[in-house]
Image: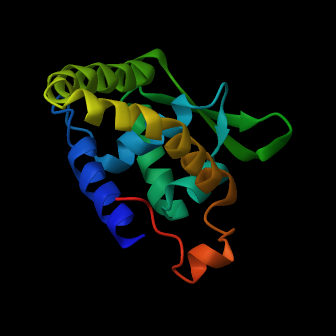
Amino acid sequence: MAQFIAVVEEFNRFYIRLPRRGNHSFSTLSVLDALARESGPKRLADLIAGEQLSRPGLTQLVQRLESDGLVERGSDPRDRRAVLVHLTEKGRGVGASRNRERVERLTPLVARLTPEERGAISGALPALRRLARLGRDSAGSAVSPAAAEGRWTPAE
């Protein structure tokens, strides 16, 4: 498990720094990405839970994003006290631009891998996708006894 975590962390450090355009903070980009995954507006309280930011910190961030034209805020028609946040087209464009740049920068690197390495990555994608969904859906609360005791180890 330790090797898996180390490799994921190493890749994440590399991956989140791939796009070099723009001057948006990681928190800004994370909030924009969270909103892009939704089909509609998201409650501010839900963003707080998912982004691991304090209410005042996220409120200030959303205010900056709104003044930059990247998001819009409104009240929830079901609960006028709640704030809904959604992406503008400009905000959606920031995410699209980041994805394009990542593809541009990763494609030549992946091309340098052996066919076997590319196949190994392709083969791991379904499991990694499921792991990400399990983590997102459970927020880390459900851990199997084998994993908790450190008995599960990925193949090297």
View extreme (bottom): residue: 149
Q: Residue at x 65, y 38 (%)?
A: 42
Q: Position of residue 49 (x, y in %)?
A: 61, 58
Q: Residue at x 82, y 33 (%)?
A: 77
Q: Position of residue 3 (x, y in %)?
A: 33, 67
Comparing 110 with 51, the one in front is 110
Q: Position of residue 138 (x, y in %)?
A: 68, 59
View extreme (right): residue: 78
Q: Is residue 89 above or below residue 65?
A: above
| The C terminus - image quarter | bottom left
Q: Residue at x 66, y 53 (%)?
A: 45
Q: Is residue 90 above or below residue 21?
A: above
| The N terminus - image quarter | bottom left
Q: Position of residue 62 (x, y in %)?
A: 47, 43
Q: Is residue 150 above or below residue 77?
A: below
Total tally of numbered discs in the picture: 0
Q: Is residue 127 left or right of residue 29?
A: right
Q: Is residue 122 left or right of residue 113?
A: right
Comparing 47 with 121, the one in front is 121
Quadrant housing residue 29 = top left
Q: Is residue 83 above or below residue 73?
A: below
Q: Is residue 73 left or right of residue 113?
A: right
Q: Residue at x 41, y 59 (%)?
A: 155
Comparing 7 with 63, the one in front is 7
Quadrant housing residue 120 = top left
- Tell me how the rendering is colored: rainbow
Q: Is residue 151 left or right of residue 143?
A: left
